[in-house]
Image: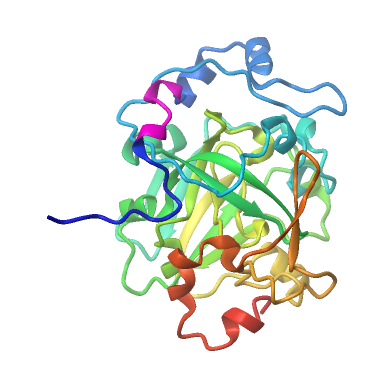
Amino acid sequence: MLYHRRPDWWLPDAAATPESAYLNRRQLLAGAGAGALLGAIGLPKAGHAAVAESPFTPMPATHPEYADAGRPVTAEDVNAAYNNFYEFGSSKKIARAAQALESDPWVLEIDGLVDTPLSIDVDDLMKRVTPEERIYRHRCVEAWSMVVPWIGLPLRDVLALAAPQSGARYVRFETFLDPAQAPGQKQHWYPWPYVEGLTIEEAQNELPLLVVGAYGKILHKQFGAPIRLHVPWKYGFKSIKSIKRITLTDERPVSFWEELAAQEYGFWANVNPEVPHPRWSQATERVLGGDDEEIPTALYNGYGDQVAHLYKDMGDLHVQSLWR
Protein backbone atom coordinates (compact mmCIF):
# COMPACT_ATOMS: atom_id res chain seq x y z
CA MET A 1 0.00 0.00 0.00
CA LEU A 2 1.26 3.47 -0.90
CA TYR A 3 1.04 6.35 1.52
CA HIS A 4 1.22 10.02 0.57
CA ARG A 5 2.82 12.15 3.27
CA ARG A 6 1.19 15.54 3.42
CA PRO A 7 3.24 18.61 4.34
CA ASP A 8 3.24 19.30 8.05
CA TRP A 9 1.42 22.61 7.61
CA TRP A 10 -1.78 20.95 6.32
CA LEU A 11 -4.83 20.27 8.46
CA PRO A 12 -7.09 17.21 8.00
CA ASP A 13 -9.71 17.35 5.25
CA ALA A 14 -12.40 17.15 7.94
CA ALA A 15 -11.38 20.63 9.09
CA ALA A 16 -11.97 22.23 5.70
CA THR A 17 -14.44 25.04 5.18
CA PRO A 18 -17.32 23.93 2.93
CA GLU A 19 -17.30 25.17 -0.66
CA SER A 20 -20.28 27.38 0.10
CA ALA A 21 -18.02 29.60 2.18
CA TYR A 22 -16.17 30.82 -0.91
CA LEU A 23 -17.04 33.93 -2.85
CA ASN A 24 -17.42 34.49 -6.54
CA ARG A 25 -15.83 37.93 -6.60
CA ARG A 26 -17.41 39.02 -9.87
CA GLN A 27 -20.90 37.98 -8.79
CA LEU A 28 -20.55 39.91 -5.55
CA LEU A 29 -19.20 43.09 -7.16
CA ALA A 30 -21.55 43.05 -10.15
CA GLY A 31 -24.57 42.50 -7.93
CA ALA A 32 -23.83 45.39 -5.59
CA GLY A 33 -24.64 49.03 -6.15
CA ALA A 34 -22.15 51.59 -4.97
CA GLY A 35 -23.80 52.03 -1.58
CA ALA A 36 -24.31 48.31 -1.09
CA LEU A 37 -20.71 47.58 -2.03
CA LEU A 38 -19.33 50.10 0.45
CA GLY A 39 -21.48 48.52 3.11
CA ALA A 40 -20.33 45.06 2.10
CA ILE A 41 -16.67 45.90 2.55
CA GLY A 42 -17.35 47.83 5.74
CA LEU A 43 -16.02 51.25 4.74
CA PRO A 44 -14.63 52.51 8.04
CA LYS A 45 -15.28 55.68 9.90
CA ALA A 46 -12.22 57.70 10.71
CA GLY A 47 -9.80 55.64 12.76
CA HIS A 48 -11.53 52.32 12.09
CA ALA A 49 -10.55 49.43 9.81
CA ALA A 50 -12.58 48.14 6.89
CA VAL A 51 -13.91 44.66 7.68
CA ALA A 52 -16.00 42.87 5.06
CA GLU A 53 -19.51 41.65 5.83
CA SER A 54 -19.89 40.04 2.42
CA PRO A 55 -22.56 37.47 1.53
CA PHE A 56 -21.27 34.06 0.47
CA THR A 57 -21.91 32.43 -2.88
CA PRO A 58 -20.52 29.11 -4.11
CA MET A 59 -17.27 29.00 -6.05
CA PRO A 60 -17.38 25.92 -8.31
CA ALA A 61 -14.71 23.23 -8.38
CA THR A 62 -12.99 24.42 -5.22
CA HIS A 63 -11.11 21.87 -3.14
CA PRO A 64 -9.58 23.86 -0.29
CA GLU A 65 -6.82 22.52 1.95
CA TYR A 66 -6.22 24.06 5.34
CA ALA A 67 -2.88 25.04 6.71
CA ASP A 68 -2.07 24.78 10.40
CA ALA A 69 0.05 27.77 11.39
CA GLY A 70 0.79 26.42 14.85
CA ARG A 71 -0.84 29.35 16.64
CA PRO A 72 -4.23 31.09 16.52
CA VAL A 73 -5.42 33.11 13.54
CA THR A 74 -5.11 36.87 14.02
CA ALA A 75 -8.49 38.51 14.48
CA GLU A 76 -9.78 40.01 11.24
CA ASP A 77 -10.39 43.44 12.73
CA VAL A 78 -6.82 43.56 14.03
CA ASN A 79 -5.35 42.54 10.68
CA ALA A 80 -7.59 44.89 8.72
CA ALA A 81 -6.48 47.88 10.82
CA TYR A 82 -2.70 47.35 10.64
CA ASN A 83 -1.34 47.37 7.10
CA ASN A 84 1.73 48.36 5.15
CA PHE A 85 0.63 49.71 1.76
CA TYR A 86 2.87 52.65 0.89
CA GLU A 87 0.84 53.47 -2.19
CA PHE A 88 -1.76 54.83 0.24
CA GLY A 89 0.47 56.21 2.99
CA SER A 90 3.41 55.36 5.21
CA SER A 91 1.44 54.73 8.42
CA LYS A 92 -0.30 51.48 9.34
CA LYS A 93 -3.69 53.24 9.28
CA ILE A 94 -4.30 53.21 5.53
CA ALA A 95 -7.48 51.09 5.45
CA ARG A 96 -9.81 53.96 4.64
CA ALA A 97 -7.51 55.50 2.02
CA ALA A 98 -7.09 52.12 0.30
CA GLN A 99 -10.81 52.00 -0.51
CA ALA A 100 -10.02 54.36 -3.42
CA LEU A 101 -8.38 51.46 -5.26
CA GLU A 102 -10.44 50.39 -8.28
CA SER A 103 -10.01 46.63 -8.17
CA ASP A 104 -12.62 45.51 -10.73
CA PRO A 105 -12.04 44.84 -13.52
CA TRP A 106 -8.41 43.81 -12.98
CA VAL A 107 -6.32 42.26 -15.73
CA LEU A 108 -3.14 40.38 -14.87
CA GLU A 109 -0.37 40.15 -17.47
CA ILE A 110 2.07 37.21 -17.51
CA ASP A 111 4.87 37.70 -20.02
CA GLY A 112 8.59 37.42 -20.67
CA LEU A 113 10.28 34.05 -21.15
CA VAL A 114 7.07 32.07 -21.56
CA ASP A 115 5.59 30.13 -24.46
CA THR A 116 2.04 31.30 -23.76
CA PRO A 117 1.83 34.92 -22.62
CA LEU A 118 -1.40 35.69 -20.78
CA SER A 119 -3.59 38.73 -20.33
CA ILE A 120 -6.33 37.52 -18.04
CA ASP A 121 -8.95 38.97 -15.71
CA VAL A 122 -8.56 37.81 -12.12
CA ASP A 123 -12.05 36.28 -12.14
CA ASP A 124 -11.22 34.25 -15.25
CA LEU A 125 -7.94 33.20 -13.66
CA MET A 126 -9.84 31.77 -10.69
CA LYS A 127 -11.77 29.59 -13.14
CA ARG A 128 -8.54 28.09 -14.48
CA VAL A 129 -6.68 27.55 -11.20
CA THR A 130 -8.49 26.15 -8.17
CA PRO A 131 -8.39 28.45 -5.12
CA GLU A 132 -7.27 26.95 -1.81
CA GLU A 133 -7.48 28.22 1.75
CA ARG A 134 -4.26 28.04 3.72
CA ILE A 135 -3.56 29.47 7.16
CA TYR A 136 -0.10 30.99 6.94
CA ARG A 137 2.19 32.81 9.34
CA HIS A 138 3.20 36.29 8.22
CA ARG A 139 6.43 37.82 9.56
CA CYS A 140 7.20 41.48 8.87
CA VAL A 141 10.77 42.74 8.70
CA GLU A 142 9.70 45.26 11.35
CA ALA A 143 9.60 42.32 13.84
CA TRP A 144 5.84 41.89 14.20
CA SER A 145 3.79 38.94 13.00
CA MET A 146 0.29 37.65 12.45
CA VAL A 147 -1.52 34.55 11.17
CA VAL A 148 -3.89 34.87 8.20
CA PRO A 149 -6.38 32.46 6.57
CA TRP A 150 -5.64 33.30 2.95
CA ILE A 151 -7.64 32.10 -0.05
CA GLY A 152 -5.28 31.91 -3.00
CA LEU A 153 -4.06 30.28 -6.17
CA PRO A 154 -0.81 28.30 -5.94
CA LEU A 155 1.72 30.47 -7.77
CA ARG A 156 3.32 27.52 -9.52
CA ASP A 157 -0.04 26.53 -11.02
CA VAL A 158 -0.59 30.05 -12.35
CA LEU A 159 2.89 30.17 -13.88
CA ALA A 160 2.30 26.79 -15.51
CA LEU A 161 -0.53 28.33 -17.56
CA ALA A 162 2.05 30.50 -19.31
CA ALA A 163 4.52 27.61 -19.88
CA PRO A 164 7.82 29.07 -18.58
CA GLN A 165 10.79 28.61 -20.89
CA SER A 166 13.94 26.85 -19.77
CA GLY A 167 15.88 30.12 -19.72
CA ALA A 168 13.61 31.69 -17.10
CA ARG A 169 15.61 32.09 -13.88
CA TYR A 170 13.58 34.73 -12.03
CA VAL A 171 10.00 35.88 -11.63
CA ARG A 172 9.43 39.64 -11.47
CA PHE A 173 6.21 41.06 -9.97
CA GLU A 174 4.94 44.59 -10.55
CA THR A 175 1.98 46.42 -9.02
CA PHE A 176 -0.25 49.12 -10.51
CA LEU A 177 0.84 52.71 -11.15
CA ASP A 178 -1.92 55.29 -10.74
CA PRO A 179 -1.20 58.31 -8.51
CA ALA A 180 -4.77 59.52 -8.98
CA GLN A 181 -5.98 56.51 -6.98
CA ALA A 182 -2.93 56.03 -4.79
CA PRO A 183 -1.64 59.35 -3.40
CA GLY A 184 1.49 57.72 -2.01
CA GLN A 185 2.66 57.25 -5.60
CA LYS A 186 2.94 61.03 -5.90
CA GLN A 187 5.98 60.82 -3.60
CA HIS A 188 8.64 60.79 -6.29
CA TRP A 189 11.48 59.76 -3.99
CA TYR A 190 10.06 56.23 -4.06
CA PRO A 191 10.82 54.06 -7.14
CA TRP A 192 7.23 53.41 -8.23
CA PRO A 193 5.72 51.09 -9.22
CA TYR A 194 6.40 48.57 -6.46
CA VAL A 195 8.46 45.65 -7.79
CA GLU A 196 9.46 42.36 -6.21
CA GLY A 197 11.08 39.14 -7.36
CA LEU A 198 11.74 35.48 -6.66
CA THR A 199 13.94 32.88 -8.26
CA ILE A 200 12.08 30.46 -10.51
CA GLU A 201 12.79 27.69 -7.98
CA GLU A 202 11.24 29.73 -5.17
CA ALA A 203 8.24 30.64 -7.30
CA GLN A 204 7.63 26.99 -8.22
CA ASN A 205 7.78 25.84 -4.61
CA GLU A 206 4.51 24.52 -3.15
CA LEU A 207 4.06 27.37 -0.64
CA PRO A 208 3.71 30.73 -2.51
CA LEU A 209 0.13 31.85 -3.11
CA LEU A 210 -1.41 34.48 -5.32
CA VAL A 211 -3.99 35.57 -2.77
CA VAL A 212 -7.52 36.53 -3.84
CA GLY A 213 -9.31 36.38 -0.48
CA ALA A 214 -8.95 36.18 3.29
CA TYR A 215 -11.16 35.24 6.21
CA GLY A 216 -13.54 33.52 3.78
CA LYS A 217 -14.17 36.79 1.89
CA ILE A 218 -12.96 38.66 -1.13
CA LEU A 219 -9.67 40.38 -0.42
CA HIS A 220 -9.88 43.64 1.53
CA LYS A 221 -8.39 46.49 -0.47
CA GLN A 222 -5.88 47.30 2.26
CA PHE A 223 -4.67 43.68 1.98
CA GLY A 224 -3.75 44.22 -1.68
CA ALA A 225 -6.93 43.52 -3.65
CA PRO A 226 -7.71 41.93 -5.94
CA ILE A 227 -4.59 39.73 -6.14
CA ARG A 228 -1.41 39.78 -4.09
CA LEU A 229 1.51 37.48 -3.36
CA HIS A 230 2.21 35.72 -0.07
CA VAL A 231 5.56 34.01 0.47
CA PRO A 232 5.40 32.75 4.07
CA TRP A 233 9.09 32.03 4.66
CA LYS A 234 10.24 35.52 3.65
CA TYR A 235 9.79 38.91 5.28
CA GLY A 236 6.51 40.55 4.41
CA PHE A 237 7.86 43.20 2.03
CA LYS A 238 8.50 40.38 -0.47
CA SER A 239 4.74 39.69 -0.63
CA ILE A 240 3.78 42.38 -3.16
CA LYS A 241 0.21 43.70 -3.25
CA SER A 242 -2.21 44.48 -6.11
CA ILE A 243 -0.19 42.74 -8.81
CA LYS A 244 -0.65 43.83 -12.42
CA ARG A 245 2.26 42.09 -14.18
CA ILE A 246 4.31 38.92 -13.70
CA THR A 247 7.38 38.65 -15.91
CA LEU A 248 9.64 35.63 -16.25
CA THR A 249 13.18 36.71 -16.98
CA ASP A 250 16.83 35.66 -16.97
CA GLU A 251 17.86 38.82 -15.08
CA ARG A 252 17.49 39.18 -11.32
CA PRO A 253 14.92 41.88 -10.52
CA VAL A 254 15.84 44.80 -8.29
CA SER A 255 12.95 45.16 -5.88
CA PHE A 256 11.35 48.35 -4.55
CA TRP A 257 12.96 48.33 -1.11
CA GLU A 258 16.24 46.93 -2.40
CA GLU A 259 16.55 49.91 -4.75
CA LEU A 260 15.97 52.26 -1.82
CA ALA A 261 18.22 50.56 0.75
CA ALA A 262 19.88 47.34 -0.36
CA GLN A 263 21.88 47.11 2.86
CA GLU A 264 18.60 46.76 4.77
CA TYR A 265 16.15 45.14 2.35
CA GLY A 266 17.92 42.74 0.03
CA PHE A 267 16.70 40.30 -2.58
CA TRP A 268 16.67 37.12 -0.49
CA ALA A 269 15.07 38.37 2.76
CA ASN A 270 14.40 34.92 4.20
CA VAL A 271 13.23 35.04 7.81
CA ASN A 272 16.26 34.33 9.97
CA PRO A 273 16.50 35.07 13.71
CA GLU A 274 20.31 34.81 13.59
CA VAL A 275 20.73 37.68 11.13
CA PRO A 276 19.72 41.06 12.63
CA HIS A 277 18.40 43.87 10.55
CA PRO A 278 21.08 46.60 10.50
CA ARG A 279 18.92 48.61 12.93
CA TRP A 280 17.18 45.99 15.11
CA SER A 281 17.21 42.35 16.16
CA GLN A 282 15.21 39.68 14.33
CA ALA A 283 15.49 37.13 17.14
CA THR A 284 11.93 37.70 18.39
CA GLU A 285 8.64 38.99 17.01
CA ARG A 286 5.58 40.75 18.42
CA VAL A 287 2.41 38.76 17.71
CA LEU A 288 -0.38 41.20 16.85
CA GLY A 289 -3.64 40.92 18.76
CA GLY A 290 -4.33 40.09 22.37
CA ASP A 291 -1.38 41.02 24.56
CA ASP A 292 1.04 41.51 21.63
CA GLU A 293 3.13 38.64 22.99
CA GLU A 294 6.83 38.45 22.16
CA ILE A 295 7.87 35.04 20.85
CA PRO A 296 11.09 33.61 19.36
CA THR A 297 11.37 33.83 15.58
CA ALA A 298 11.95 30.59 13.66
CA LEU A 299 14.31 30.17 10.72
CA TYR A 300 12.34 30.45 7.47
CA ASN A 301 9.40 31.46 9.66
CA GLY A 302 8.97 27.79 10.54
CA TYR A 303 8.71 26.55 6.93
CA GLY A 304 12.21 25.11 6.70
CA ASP A 305 11.01 21.60 5.82
CA GLN A 306 9.47 22.99 2.65
CA VAL A 307 12.12 25.49 1.56
CA ALA A 308 15.56 24.86 3.14
CA HIS A 309 16.59 22.72 0.16
CA LEU A 310 16.31 25.78 -2.09
CA TYR A 311 19.39 27.28 -0.42
CA LYS A 312 21.52 24.23 0.37
CA ASP A 313 24.10 25.05 -2.31
CA MET A 314 24.47 28.69 -1.29
CA GLY A 315 26.98 28.17 1.48
CA ASP A 316 26.64 30.73 4.28
CA LEU A 317 24.45 33.05 2.21
CA HIS A 318 21.22 31.67 3.62
CA VAL A 319 22.53 32.04 7.17
CA GLN A 320 24.67 35.17 7.13
CA SER A 321 23.76 37.44 4.23
CA LEU A 322 20.02 37.54 3.66
CA TRP A 323 20.08 41.31 3.12
CA ARG A 324 22.28 41.09 0.03
Q: Residue furthest bottom?
A: 315
Q: Is residue 286 in view from this perspective? A: yes
Between 247 and 238, the residue placed more toward the observer is 238
Between 307 and 161, the residue placed more toward the observer is 307
Relative height, residue 160 to residue 313 (above, below): above
Between 87 and 209, the residue placed more toward the observer is 209
**Residue 20: x percent and y percent?**
40, 20
Relative height, residue 120 to residue 41 (above, below): below
Residue at 74% over, 58% down:
285
**Residue 57: x percent and y percent?**
44, 17
Q: To which quarter of the image does residue 75 belong?
A: top right
Residue at 48% over, 49% down:
209
Residue 90 lies in the magenta-colored region: no
Q: Describe residue 145's horizontal placement relative to residue 196 as left or right.
A: right
Q: Residue furthest left?
A: 1
Q: Residue furthest front?
A: 1
Q: Describe residue 311's horizontal placement relative to residue 262 as left or right.
A: left
SS majority, magenta: helix
**Residue 158: x percent and y percent?**
38, 50
Point out the stretch of residues depicted in magenta.
Answer: 14-21
Q: Describe residue 189's horizontal placement relative to residue 218 as left or right.
A: right
Residue at 32% over, 67% down:
165
Locate the N terminus and report the quarter of the image it occupies.
bottom left
**Residue 95: x percent and y percent?**
76, 34
Residue 15 lies in the magenta-colored region: yes
Disc tally is 0
Locate the C terminus and report the quarter of the image it occupies.
bottom right
Q: To which quarter of the image does residue 89 belong?
A: top right
Q: Is residue 124 in view from this perspective? A: no
